[in-house]
Amino acid sequence: MMMSPETYYETELKGMTKDQLREEISELETEIAALTAREKELAEIRDPLERMMADPIKPDNGTRLAMNRQYLAKAMQALTEADDESK
């Protein structure tokens, strides 16, 4: 089950240092790149049943990709706020 970006912020990002936030951003970017590559592979499968069998994990690849992009935006926002607080 995926969590909302707000819950992700509250449970995963809140209280992190700037270095920890940068590491989280790097990990999210890596995950997004992998999910994007997988989405391209899945897009090449024309048969709907075959595609469903190729991506049996729920939530599906597209949902995980969309949510990770939202998490990345939250992490970047948290880093910007941390930078602003240190000034």
Image: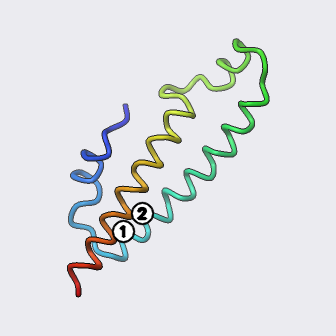
Would you place residue 11 above or below residue 58 in this image?
below
Residue that mark 1 sits on:
21
Would you place residue 17 above or below residue 64 in this image?
below
Q: In the drawing, does residue 13 fall left or right of residue 36?
A: left
Residue that mark 2 sits on:
24
Q: Residues within 10 Å of mark 1 (few under 14, many from 20)?
A: many
Q: Quadrant of residue 4?
A: top left
> Residue 71 location, x and y as percent?
39, 51
> Residue 67 location, x and y as percent?
44, 41
Of 21 and 79, the residue lying toward us: 79
Q: How is the image coloured?
A: rainbow
Numbered marks: total = 2
Residue type indicated by callout 2: Glu
Q: Quadrant of residue 35?
A: top right
**Residue in the image at 23% along x and 87% along y:** 87
Q: In the drawing, does residue 54 fall left or right of residue 86?
A: right
Disc marking residue 47: none
In 3D space, how far apart are the residues under numbered discs 2 and 1 (Cα atoms)? 5 Å
Of 56 and 4, the residue lying toward us: 4
Q: Residues within 10 Å of mark 2 (few under 14, many from 20)?
A: some
**Residue in the image at 56% along x and 50% along y:** 32
Cβ–Cβ under 8 Å for marks 2 and 1 = yes
Would you place residue 18 above or below residue 52 in this image?
below
**Residue in the image at 78% along x and 24% along y:** 45
> Residue 64 location, x and y as percent?
49, 38
Residue type indicated by callout 1: Leu
Which of the image's four quarters has the N terminus?
A: top left
